[in-house]
Every structure is written in structure tokens, then in C-alpha cells.
Image (cartoon, rainbow, N blue to C red):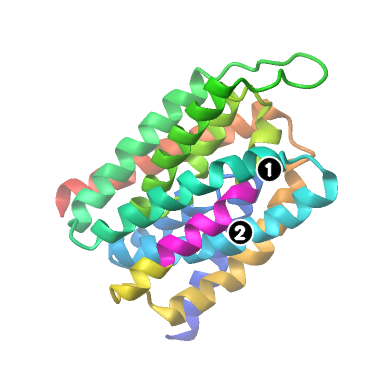
Amino acid sequence: MAPGTIALLAAGSFVMGLLGGVLGVGGGVFLVPFLVFAAGLPAKQAVAVSLCCVIGTSAAASRAAASTGAARLDLALTLEPALVIGAVAASSVAARVADGAVLIGFAVLMAVIMGLMLIRRRATVDGEPPPLTPGRRVALSVAAGASGAASGLFGVGGGVLVVPALTLIGRLPLKTAATTSSLALMTSAACGGMVYLAHGLLPPAIVAVALLGVLPGGFLGSRAQRRLPEAVMLGLFMALAAVVIGLSLWRGLRS
């Protein structure tokens, strides 16, 4: 790769990792459009690279979350099996999906996420959130399966669905949901990435450069998250998601 391309990929990946760390969505929701629109990758390759970078972002964010004790480890472990099953199943069929369809599906997914975030209700005012009932744990597992499938198809790491699920079903505050999501994303992203590697859709050189930006970006973003009001986090997500939807629909309908 040319030096300018390497610099663009590293700088862009740093920014995407920073956003992913702040919002607890693994960075993939913003990295995939960056790789498609700025770096010129085919959609399925961008998804594969994003999944690998989600691993780095989540690892960095989880390190910071573990040091603060903000994440719910019990919920992360509850979500993990369904996330992995969904990611592997979706990644296995993704190679047969056209790039244009991937981008249109990505836009639809982002619109769903915006709706979920807009209707999110905080269940706790002060103190700890209410304990989870068995029914809500099952509902969280179902949501995690759908999140894993979105991860395998669109490279978003699953956090864009896990975070709303934890706030709507688990009744967690947004920051706790974001840190818990980061803990749960690593394994499912790794499993999905392995499937793309088996299909020959994973460019190692691009992954290496992107990780150089994503790792420090995710770490810094997760630290900055503790200083941001939840209203600011929600507003930032909404603004960026609207841009992503517009660009993805434009490219997908032209493909």
C-alpha cells in the first residue's frame, strides 16, 4: 500500500475506534462505511476487516471497563453464547450476498437502531437497576442472537443492538450497557472473522494497518466515555447514524 493510503487507514481507524469506545458499539458501525466510502473496499471485505478491528476495540474498551468495575460480567457471559451462534451463522452465508444488498441492509439496521435508541427509557433513577427476571434474561439472549447475526452480516460487532437491548430489556443505564457490551463483543467478532477468513475475504495488510488506529482509539474512547453525559453520547450516536444511513443507501442503490 502507498504511504498515503496507510496514513488514511490508520487515522480513520483511530477515529472510528475512538467513537466505538465512547459509545460502546465496537467501532464497526462507523468503520464499515469509512472503509467503503473513504478507503474504497468492497462491502464484504470492509465487513471482514471491521470484525477483526472490533476485537481490538472491544479488548481495549474492556480493559478500561474492568478497571472501573462499570461492566456487568454476569450479563456479558449470559449474552456470549447467543452472540457467537448468530455471528457464525450469518458469516457463513454472507459471502453469497451482493455488496449492494449488504449496504442497504446496513442502512436498514442503522434506522432500527436509531428507533430503539430514541424510545430507550432509563429504568433507574438512583441506585442499582432492578434484578433481571428469568423472562428478561431469555429476551436478552434472543436479542443477542440477532445482534450476533448483524455482526456477521454487517461487521458491526453486535454492540449497536446489544446496547439498546441492555437498556430496554435489562433496564441498565447507557454507560453500564456500553461497557457490558464491550466485554461481550470480542468472542463473537473473532468467530465471525474466522468465517470470512475461510472464504478468502479478509485482507491481512489492511487489517494490520486498521488495528494500529483502532486499538489506541478504542482505549482513549472508553476512558473519555466516563466524562460524557449520557445525553451527549446519545446525540452523537444519532447524528453519526443519520450520516451512515444516507451514505449506505446512496451507494447500495447505485450498486
Residue at image x 51%, y 31%?
Answer: 140
Kindly give the residue lying farthest to the front in the view shown.
134
Which residue in the structure is indicated by mark 2? 57
Judged by its main secondary structure, the magenta piece is helix
In the rendered image, the quadrant that contains the C terminus is bottom left
- Residue 39 seen in the current view: no
Residue 131 highlighted magenta (yes or no): no
Residue at image x 42%, y 66%?
Answer: 193
**Above-or-below relation of 36 to 160:** below
Front residue of 254/113: it is 113
Which residue in the structure is indicated by mark 1? 179
Q: Position of residue 253 (x, y in %)?
A: 17, 46
Q: Are marks 2 and 1 in contact (CB under 8 Å)?
A: no
**Above-or-below relation of 9 to 116:** below
Magenta range is 182-193
In the rendered image, the quadrant that contains the N terminus is bottom left
Q: Position of residue 84 (x, y in %)?
A: 46, 52
Residue 186 highlighted magenta (yes or no): yes
Front residue of 136/156: it is 136
Other-residue count near label 1 (Cα within 10 Å), few / some / many at <14 / 14–19 / ≥20: many
Spatial CA distance of label 2 from label 1 is: 12 Å
The residue type indicated by label 2 comes to: Thr
- Residue 149 seen in the current view: yes
Q: Secondary structure at mark 1?
A: helix
Residue at image x 65%, y 50%?
Answer: 183
